[in-house]
Image (spheres, grey):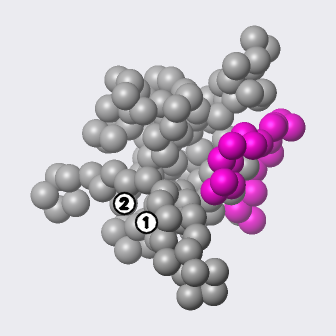
Amino acid sequence: MDLGMVPVYHGDVVFDSAQGCAIVSGDVILEQLCETLNPTRAVFLTDVQGIFTRPPTDSNAKLIKELIVCEDGTCMLPEMSNMDHDVTGGIEGKIKTACSIVNRFKIPVFIVQVGTEHAYHAMSGQIPTVCTRLTHISMVNDENREK
C-alpha cells in the first residue's frame, strides 16, 4: 500500500484442518486485511451496483445509497433475500462483514459494481456516485467525513 497499490482478491478453496478443505469468503479476507493494513476505506467489488431493497433483477428494486452502522455494529435493513448460489454467505454475509469492518476500524465501506467508473473511483480514494456506502454513526456528524 505504501507503493500506491491496492490489494484485490476473491474467495477461494483452502485447506482446513477440521474439514479437509473449505471455501473462504473474500469478505472475511478483507476484514483480516483491514486489521493488518489499517486502510482509510474498504471496497467490496460485486456484480451489481451495491445493496438493493430487493434482488437487483426485480423491477421494484432500489439501490440503498447509504447504511449507518450503529455502535453495536448493526444497521437497519429492509427485508432482503439471500442469493442461494453464493456458498460464502451471500449478501447478508457481505453486509455483516461490512458492518463489522465499519464498526471495528471506523472506516467507510463502499459496495460497488466491478468494472465500472464507480469502482475505479472507490478504489482510487474518490467517492463513487453509484454504490452503497456504509458509515459508522460516529462519523455521520463528523466535519471531516468524506462527502
Describe residue 65's horizontal placement relative to residue 57 as left or right: left
Taking the spot 75% from the left edge, 65% from the top edge, the residue there is 72
Tag count in the figure? 2
Q: Residue furthest top?
A: 59
Q: Is residue 20 above or below residue 122?
A: below
Residue 16 horizontal/vertical position (percent) = 55, 81
Taking the spot 49% from the left edge, 45% from the top edge, the residue there is 44
Q: Residue furthest bottom?
A: 17
Amino acid identity at mark 2: Pro
Quick one: SS at disc 2? loop
Q: Is residue 80 magenta?
A: yes
Amino acid identity at mark 1: Cys
Where are the magenta residues, as a range?
72-90
Quick one: SS at disc 1? helix
Residue 49 horizontal/vertical position (percent) = 55, 27
Distance CA(mark 1)–CA(mark 2) = 6 Å
Dot 2: few (<14), some (14–19), or many (≥20) neighbours within 10 Å? some
Query: Which one is nearer the viewer's eye here, 92 or 23?
Result: 23
Do callouts 1 and 2 mark residues in contact (Cβ within 8 Å)? yes
Q: Is residue 67 above or below residue 130?
A: below
Residue 39, numbered label: 2
